Amino acid sequence: MKTSLLLAAAVATLSAPELWAAEGKRVVVVTVTTGFRHSSIGTAEKVLQKLADESKAFEIVGYVRQPDVEVPKKPAKPRPLKPDADDKAKASFAKQMENYEKQMAAWTPEMESQLKAAQAKLDEGIRSALTRLAPDRLKADKVDGVIFANTTGNLPLPDPEGFIRWIGEGHAFMAMHSASDTLHGFPGYIDMLQGEFLTHGAQVPADLVAGDQAHPANGGLGETFDLKQEEMYQIKSQDRSKVRSLWFLKHHPNVPEQAGFFPVSWCRKSGTGNVFYTSLGHREDVWDDSAELPNRVNPPEVSRKYQAHILGGIKWALGLVPGSAEPNPTVGPQ
């Protein structure tokens, strides 16, 4: 696959001395989930590895991956009917309940026991995999930064507060999409990231506006970045006086007539560490610029722009290229 002009331009921002320094930048990629698991995770790993290999800006020295444990699925009870449900919805609900009751009648104690055993094995595997993020291990492995790529859920970090301190001591934290739907129960993580997933609607076109055209995470895209289709998050738990907006929407993603400021990507300082986050990255065709990717909606050019965006953010977070982290709360609608 040929490197795009955008990606080539991003790589070219490294001078010869910086390229030499970049060889020592060591990154761990985390794709573990305890909540929803995105089908794009494998694609994300592939693209991140490609960016590392082609840019020479960083080396991925390890992946913290999901253990290969299959947990049986217990029949899921249908969601209750809404009070204003019409006759069609009621009929559909009745059919769903009938099917659910049949499945539960066939659900045996042995199946329940197998589910619990598999879940326990998965949980233990996740805990074991995440020991890679213990601060002493990160220091021993000389890791410069950690990427959370589409992680979800309350990950059992071996030392949560220690991990946040490690970032604040001058290391990099870089995160994509559902990393903001991760560790909801850990205030230290939410404060470090300065943004928490609230909800999302149906996938929609997105007309992003740049908060900082000069920042490396702009990817050389300029003032706007349009996607044909993406799952756009609504974010809570953000103090705009503590972040530098990189990309945002001027309107509600699913209600265009509702004006406002809707953050998409930002960066900040956490202690002396650098934090970069983008809520983009749900779809495979946002990550992967292969023309052969099946069921494409976003053209490869969108994927190349996304890759330039995250590569710029990663290089900035690792201290390889300059860029401001000064909060810009007056950017966009107030």
Image (cartoon, rainbow, N blue to C red):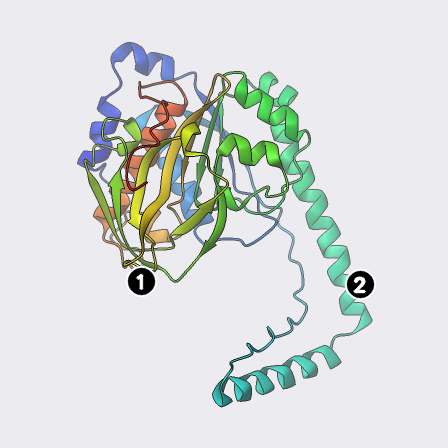
Disc 1 and disc 2: Cα gap in Å? Answer: 39 Å
Residue 64 location, x and y as percent? Answer: 56, 37
Whether 113 is drawn above or below 28: the answer is below
> Closest to the observer: 202 or 113?
202
Residue 187 location, x and y as percent? Answer: 61, 35
For residue 64, which numbered disc appears in the image? none
Q: Considering the image in quadrants, where does the N terminus appear?
A: top left
Dot 1 crowding, Cα within 10 Å, few <14, some 14–19, many 20+: few
Residue 322 location, x and y as percent? Answer: 31, 18
What residue does disc 1 label?
295
| Residue found at x 37% / y 17% | 22
> For this view, does 209 lie left or right of residue 85?
left
| Residue found at x 48% / y 46% | 178
Location of residue 17 by image quarter: top left
> For this view, does 249 lie left or right of residue 187?
left
Whether residues under marks 1 and 2 lie with C-beta atoms below 8 angstroms apart, the answer is no
Answer yes or no: is residue 249 visible: yes
Residue at the front extreme, as displayed: 334
Residue 43 location, x and y as percent? Answer: 41, 47
Whether 26 is drawn above or below 103: the answer is above
Image mark count: 2
Q: Earlier in the sequence, mark 1 or mark 2?
A: 2
Mark 2: secondary structure: helix
Q: Considering the image in quadrants, where does the C terminus appear?
A: top left
| Residue found at x 33% / y 55% | 253
Three-letter code for the amino acid on which mark 1 is drawn: Asn
Three-letter code for the amino acid on which mark 2 is drawn: Ser
Whether 299 is drawn above or below 267: the answer is below
Whether 321 is drawn above or below 72: the answer is above
Mark 1: secondary structure: loop
What residue does disc 2 label?
113
> Closest to the observer: 109 or 205?
205
